[in-house]
Image (cartoon, coloured by chain):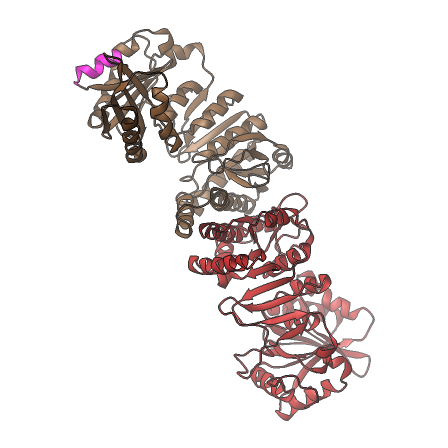
Chain colours: A brown, B red
Amino acid sequence: MALMVRKYGGSSVADLEKIRNIAKQLVDLRREGNDVVVVLSAMKGETDRLINLAKEINARPNSREMDCLVSIGEQTTVSLMAMALIGMGQDAVSLLGHQAGIHTDNAFGSARIENVDASRVRDELKKGRVVVVAGFQGIDPDENITTLGRGGSDTTAVALAAAVSADICEIFTDVTGVFTTDPNVVPKARKLDRISYDEMMEMASLGAKILEIRSVEYAKNCNVPLHVRSTFSDEQGTMVVKEDKDMEKQVVSGVAYDKNEARLTVTKVPDRPGIAYKILKPISDANIVVDMIIQNTRAEDMTDISFTVPKKDFQTAMELLQGTAKEIGATRVLGDDNISKVSIVGVGMRNHPGVATEMFGVLSQHNINIMMISTSEIKISCVIDEKYTELAVRVLHDAFGLDKELKEAHP
Amino acid sequence: MALMVRKYGGSSVADLEKIRNIAKQLVDLRREGNDVVVVLSAMKGETDRLINLAKEINARPNSREMDCLVSIGEQTTVSLMAMALIGMGQDAVSLLGHQAGIHTDNAFGSARIENVDASRVRDELKKGRVVVVAGFQGIDPDENITTLGRGGSDTTAVALAAAVSADICEIFTDVTGVFTTDPNVVPKARKLDRISYDEMMEMASLGAKILEIRSVEYAKNCNVPLHVRSTFSDEQGTMVVKEDKDMEKQVVSGVAYDKNEARLTVTKVPDRPGIAYKILKPISDANIVVDMIIQNTRAEDMTDISFTVPKKDFQTAMELLQGTAKEIGATRVLGDDNISKVSIVGVGMRNHPGVATEMFGVLSQHNINIMMISTSEIKISCVIDEKYTELAVRVLHDAFGLDKELKEAHP
């Protein structure tokens, strides 16, 4: 007897059979007396199909029109789901972004939810209906359709859960939960029962593709309990919740890796105020997201600056940087796209000094050279040679005892 | 230099190449200084594809959800068209039913337009944009998506043309205009330069599939000049306009036929008040549309009643009628689904007595038996044996001189 928001991703609604199976689960959930809001993504592959269609007619399609087009993916799944439920004798109604009161700014393609007017959702729930909401989409102040960007359906679910004060927001996906690391790399990887919002955000931004980072941030801000679980099994998944004392006992909760970055370095830069700005401005003007930035001081008022960018933007960034280097009189520009970033995450780090040292020690024991380091309060990332990625993940997972339940001491 | 509303049907936007071709025409139209609103249908076959998808998940899909689903067909074409226009350097914006202010009642699947708030359309036109509106769809007072029923895009175009006081509403289709009869049956059939709203409505309801009848009614009420023409040629089409004196000189403007009806007869019905009601009530309760109704008086307070229904409803209607016949003590129920209805239409009939007699004479000269007759002020319809349809159409077309420009005398 709870108010539940459930979100199913594209692989969970990939065909009519899968939609029917989810409908059956929702009918059971209603029979048990729960109020149910369900948020759906487009059928797997559908969004890409629509994007390709758009690019056939215009190589650089207008973003407002693109949002209008791709939003039909979710429109299709929600109406089909409502039909399936009604066919099973369970009253239901589909709501599109604008009908569900998902108000966003007008940043087409990556709009932010500004507020949620859940009055219609509440009304429909009161009628005993399962409310089937199109994820990923909203409406801007001028009534244009917007989309929230890739993975935006997670954010829709969390925002609705917050707006209706749901007891829980369940994110159904094709994995059974959040793991200590990628089980494809480390077969001993363990599913976490619980993880804090902050850890989940770090994991999400570090390449673990389970939850969209904005949705976790939203959940944290509104204190919405998330349950990440599998569409295809009844198994308990991972709860993403507010941090508590117990969690700090675990120094490291997970190991993440990301092979999608490339590193650029410009050497012997005259060390003047504003030089980093000069170097990075053309990069960000080209809409390239810079991740890590390292500046080393050299002798003779010279400095080296390194930074990482998404691999797909590597060539563009190199060309821009070569231009800037000439302008400012820097000596050389180096680039390397055979790198990867390996990170350890855990709220326990805050109270356990020396975790970074241990990480560096473990990597050096296996002759893995560290090219760049960046840290936050609950995360340490190292850039290494790409070919050592799996080895690094395995040895770190082992060293921090992640295959065992709750490990309090250091390795 | 005009304000034009153009509507393109599904075969005109069947693929990206066709969408691109129309976009080119619209760019030219803008260059000539015209303001352009374009209403689009779904790509040919798309609506049927969506209906079949729905029926796979629920044999009798809920009509609200069906409207939500099928409306994506038009959503696809309008966003693609806007992208194509923008790609050609012509600013454009797509508007869905709710964005274009198409307010309807909530009769899902066959909603009626209640009012049009064209303020957004006007604003976008002022910005110099081509406004691309999704046909066939609107929004009800509760913000649910509705559809106007088959052919509803014509009505969208006419309603918008009325709301923005367009100089002309052009309906682009796969034929070059309205013909005196089906050119597949009578190769000598002639394209009409002009036809009155009333004649067009009769032609539409009699089986000429060029324009949706409601759109013609709407155009008549708001006095919107329609131009029916071909997407695939520059040829002048047919103007559908207010009746004028000149039109009355033409006794008959067109010959229409409809093979989609079936006839039911119940004989020796006790001739009491309310007997027709008793017979027809179960039929209309089953949502079967009755077209012609004929009652003949017999001797001995007995009467025969015949009526026609759509061929697809023939079996259901027969079963219902057999039940009623037993109840009221009628002798026999007869059915015939090998019939067709042949009609002549023309505003000139009003001032030319004897046109019906001539029609019957022509048919009898060719040994075509007339089973039922129905007339309106500007139309005479005869039900005949289906196998004589083409013959009847040909001889009537000849007899009333429809292959020649303006014929004033009788045959």
Q: Is residue A4 visible?
A: no
Membership of B340 in magenta stretch: no
Point out residue A360 in the picture as x, y percentages from the top left corner: 24, 14
Tell whether B274 sits left or right of A84.
Answer: right
Membership of A363 in magenta stretch: yes
Work out whether A358 lies above or below B364.
above
Q: In front here: A392 or B37? A: B37
Work out whether B325 lies above or below B139.
below
Tell whether A374 sits left or right of B316.
Answer: left
Tell whether B349 sits left or right of B182.
Answer: right
Quadrant showing the C terminus of chain B: bottom right
Q: In front here: A150 or B124? A: B124
Residue at 35% across / 24% down in the picture? A278
Point out residue A231 in the picture as x, y percentages from the top left corner: 42, 35
Q: To which quarter of the image does residue B192 belong?
A: bottom right
Q: Which residues are magenta?
A: A358-367
Q: In front here: B5 or A396? A: B5
Q: Magenta region's main secondary structure? A: helix
Tell whether B97 sits left or right of B295.
Answer: left
Q: In front here: A277 or A97? A: A277
Point out residue A348 in the picture as x, y percentages from the top left corner: 37, 11
Q: To which quarter of the image does residue A368 belong?
A: top left
How many numbered marks are there?
0
Quadrant showing the N terminus of chain B: bottom right
Q: Is residue B332 visible?
A: yes
Point out residue B296 in the picture as x, y percentages from the top left corner: 76, 80
